[in-house]
Image (tube, rainbow, N blue to C red):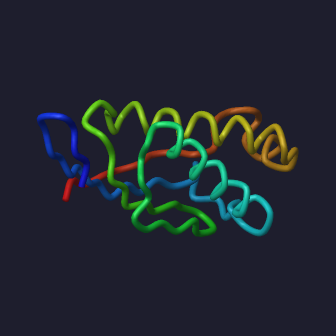
């Protein structure tokens, strides 16, 4: 629950996105680093992760976010930044995806 001077809000969302072509690349150190990056990006935007799982080919997060944050903007930041940083830190991803973003489609539901 978020309280402002004249408002109270609780906006939550369940977001799921998969790696491009559903390749099983989110394993080991890549999986750990991906998790760290998602947490860091959410902290910057004051987004609280209620639950989350980084699987080998997809990511689930259930978040609570402030009204000023748009889900599409948040997902653009998470997918774009994490993809760019992971490809920079793990060259084996660059070989598989040729420098293109490797986090593919996503969906979300408001709860």
Q: Is residue 33 left or right of residue 82?
A: right
* Direction left: furthest residue: 6
Q: How many marks?
A: 0
Q: Residue at x 70, y 62 (%)?
A: 31
Q: Residue 69 sits in which quadrant?
A: top left
Q: Where does the image place residue 21, in percent across and percent down from the top left?
A: 58, 52
**Percent of width and height locating residue 51:** 43, 68
- Near-viewer residue (99 or 55): 55
Task: Give the farthest residue toward the right.
Answer: 91
x and y percentages locating residue 48 in the rendered image = 42, 54
- Which residue does the image show at 67% across and 64% down from the upper left? 24
Q: Quadrant of the C terminus?
A: bottom left
Quadrant containing the N terminus is bottom left
Q: Is 73 on the left or on the right of 4, as rendered?
A: right
Return the residue nearer the eye: 23 or 10: 10
Q: Which residue is at the front of the view, 63 or 19? A: 63
**At which x and y percent is residue 99?**
75, 32
Q: Quadrant of residue 94?
A: top right
Q: Residue at x 82, y 37 (%)?
A: 88
Residue reaching furthest to the front: 5
- Tell me: 101 left or right of 4: right
Q: Which residue: 33% across, 46% down?
A: 65
């Amino acid at each position: 629950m978020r309280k402002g001077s004249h408002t109270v809000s609780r906006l939550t969302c369940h977001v799921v996105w998969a790696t491009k072509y559903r390749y099983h690349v989110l394993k080991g150190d890549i999986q750990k680093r991906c998790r760290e990056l998602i947490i860091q990006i959410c902290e910057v935007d004051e987004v609280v992760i209620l639950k989350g799982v980084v699987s080998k080919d997809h990511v689930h997060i259930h978040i609570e976010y402030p009204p000023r944050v748009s889900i599409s903007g948040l997902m653009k930041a998470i997918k774009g930044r994490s993809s760019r940083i992971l490809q920079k830190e793990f060259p084996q991803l660059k070989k598989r995806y040729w420098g293109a973003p490797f986090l593919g489609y996503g969906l979300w539901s408001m709860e």
